Image (cartoon, grey):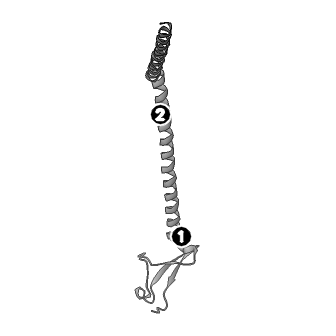
């Protein structure tokens, strides 16, 4: 009988330990749940999310403006290559009828004795046509 009492006592001890362990685990889960729902924890999580989105927005804006700046730079270079002033710097000239100001593109548009205005990179000339060669 003593053996049986010891067995039952041991079994009861094991069951009580198991029960206490389960209750401790449940208590820990409830504490964690309460901690997650605590207003300060919610605020902290909100601040972390805000910081994340703020950084993401900053990066997106920075990238957007870098792309726009590069595009503007490329358009500036293109505009510079097409600029009449740059064309004149390369040795070309712009010829216009005088006084009308119509751009002359072909010798066929000009007759002897006509006045032409020639724009150079440094200055302009007013000339009279003496001979036309087509």
Disc assigned to residue 108: none
The kind of secondary structure element at disc 1 is helix
- Residue corresponding to mark 1: 85
Q: Nearer the viewer, residue 129 or 14?
A: 14
Would you place residue 64 above or below residue 87 in this image? above
Say which quadrant the C terminus sits in: bottom left
Extreme residue in the top direction: 2
Residue 123 picture quarter:
bottom right
Q: Which mark is residue 50?
A: 2
Image coordinates for residue 117, horizontal then vertical, percent: 49, 78
Relative image position of residue 98 (x, y in whole percent): 44, 78
Mark 1 packing: few (<14 Cα in 10 Å), some, or many (20+)? some
Above/below status of 92 relative to 48: below
Asked if 123 appears above or below 42 in the picture, the reply is below
The residue located at (50%, 50%) in the rendering is 63
Give the percent coordinates (x, y) of residue 91.
57, 78
Viewer-side residue, 102 vs 53:
53
- Looking at the image, which residue is at 47% across and 7% down? 1
In the current view of this chain or complex, which residue is farthest to the front? 1
Mark 2: give few (<14), some (14-19) or many (20+) Cα within 10 Å.
few
Residue 107 at x, y percent in the picture: 44, 87
Q: Nearer the viewer, mark 2 or mark 1?
A: 2
Along the line of sight, the residue nearer the viewer: 114 or 17 = 17
Q: Is residue 106 left or right of residue 81?
A: left
Secondary element type, mark 2: helix
Residue nearest the observer in this picture, 31 or 119: 31
């Amino acid at each position: 009988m003593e053996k049986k009492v010891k067995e039952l006592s041991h079994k009861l001890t094991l069951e009580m330990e198991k029960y206490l362990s389960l209750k401790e685990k449940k208590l820990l889960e409830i504490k964690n749940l309460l901690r997650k729902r605590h207003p300060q924890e919610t605020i902290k999580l909100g601040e972390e999310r805000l910081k994340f989105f703020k950084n993401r927005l900053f990066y997106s804006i920075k990238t957007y403006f870098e792309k726009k700046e590069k595009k503007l730079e490329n358009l500036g270079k293109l505009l510079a290559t097409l600029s009449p002033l740059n064309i004149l710097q390369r040795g070309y000239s712009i010829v216009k009828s005088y006084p009308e100001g119509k751009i002359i593109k072909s010798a066929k548009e000009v007759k002897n004795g006509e006045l032409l205005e020639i724009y150079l990179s440094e200055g302009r000339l007013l000339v009279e046509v003496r001979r036309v060669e087509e």
